[in-house]
Image (cartoon, helix red, strand yellow):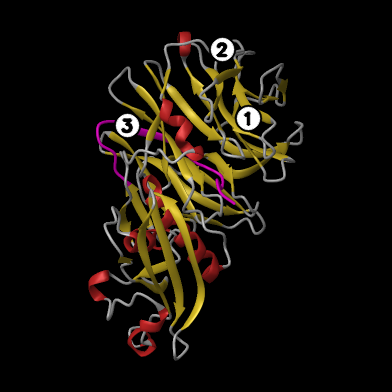
Amino acid sequence: MKLKSRFTSVITVIALFFSNAVTAESDVVISVDEGVSMAQPIAVVPFKANGGVPADIGQIISDDLRNSGKFTPIEQAKLPAQPGSVAEVNSQQWTDIGVDSVVVGQVTPTGGGYNVAYQLVDTLSNPAAVLAQGSFNVPAAQIRQGAHTVSDQVFEKITQIRGAFRTKIAYVVQRGVSSYELRVSDYDGYNAFTVVKSREPLMSPEWSPDGSRLAYVTFENKKAQVVVHDLRSGSRRVVAALRGHNGAPAFSPDGSRIAFASNQDGELDIYVVSANGGKPSKLTANAGNNTEPSWSPDGSTIYFTSDRAGSPQVYRMSSSGGGASPMGGSGSYNAKVSSDGKNLIMIAGDKVVKRDLTSGGTEVLSSTFLDESPSISPNGIMVIYSSTKGTSKVLQLVSADGRFKANLPGAGGQFKFPAWSPYLTK
């Protein structure tokens, strides 16, 4: 059914991926807590600006590579030179400081936007050699996306892992006791905008696999319902409104179904419903409270939290129900599976923990307080989550190896329920 409410959709939602009109508004921006001393050194030289350019392309690329936890970019003030192309790179200058890879480039205004050209240079060769290069035009309002595109290409060339710097995050901001906003921004907090506002709570946003929709929980009419919001058109549809509480939505890998939790029969159970709505199918019954479903990448398995053994613990079962087995240990919850199906990211002991699904080994990734709601970048390299800092809820970022840690401090509100988008570009 269509949703009628006091919610107000912002027209700029339409510009999310499908136009050039993206605002530069930001309410969270990455601030480094703990860098990576053992990561691969790399140098990103300030890009030569052939005319006025509103963003420091080189610094954005440097920040992206640092945020992945895979690289330690050299500070701009410590660069031995600032070449603009491979022809100007003196290999010896860079190998003397232990740098094997250098990114150089130029930005040129063109029409209503900019041309961004870059070269990834190998300094182990003498003369220096080009490992990768590219040149492309971006609209003026998406100059940061141009930088993220370079970051993606450089990251993939060196690591053989697809970059995820052009992805988005969704999150909820609570301001006071009766103002809630579902926000979407670039992964690093820039270009943020409001998807929907409400005087009632908003919770648990989750992206569809193609990035075109968000499922989330609303408390319209004082009732928890699961809504699917189309980001292109701004239309919203209630897909789960069973008696009692409905929450924790999760899209299936093909985007056709949504798993969610409802307590219509007294205890919380896992249900699955079409992403367009309809009659839900019940997957769990008579086994304590079951919530927080999350699908495996192939759609065959659902991970979820249950207290059936007396305390919360992560379990897994067939996506058709049945055969539940414990996975995370006592006190584990909020589980998400990496896109390659190799790791489970969850909360245990109020920390973000990674569990290797093959070996069973676990690793604590976070060092913050009262962590919750972890979400994994589509390439499995970074994890965003919410934690408590003083009396505030803030967003945190940690690399999946736990070596790089950063926070995304937000002003004027409580920042909760972060959700990382899938890849949004080919």
Q: Could you say which is closer to the camera, residue 31 or residue 316?
A: 31
Judge the density around disc 2: few (<14), some (14-19), many (≥20) Cα neighbours within 10 Å: some
Q: What residue type is labelled 3?
A: Gln
Q: Position of residue 153 (x, y in %)?
A: 51, 63
- Decide: is 378 above or below 118: above
- The residue mark sitting in front, 2 or 1, is 2
Quarter of the image with the N terminus is top right
Kindly tell me whether residue 366 is visible in this rendering. Answer: no
**N-term mark: 2 or 1:** 2
Judge the density around disc 3: few (<14), some (14-19), many (≥20) Cα neighbours within 10 Å: some
Magenta range is 408-426
Q: Could you say which is closer to the camera, residue 119 or residue 352?
A: 119
Residue at the spot 70% in from the left edge and 26% down from the top edge: 284
Residue 413 tag number: none
Residue that label 1 marks: 308
Q: How far apart are marks 1 and 3 (CA)?
A: 32 Å
**N-term mark: 3 or 2:** 2
Residue that label 2 marks: 244
Q: Where is residue 70 in the image (x, y as percent from the top left)?
A: 45, 66
- The residue mark sitting in front, 1 or 3, is 3
Q: Where is residue 383 in the image (x, y as percent from the top left)?
A: 47, 49
Residue 414 tag number: 3
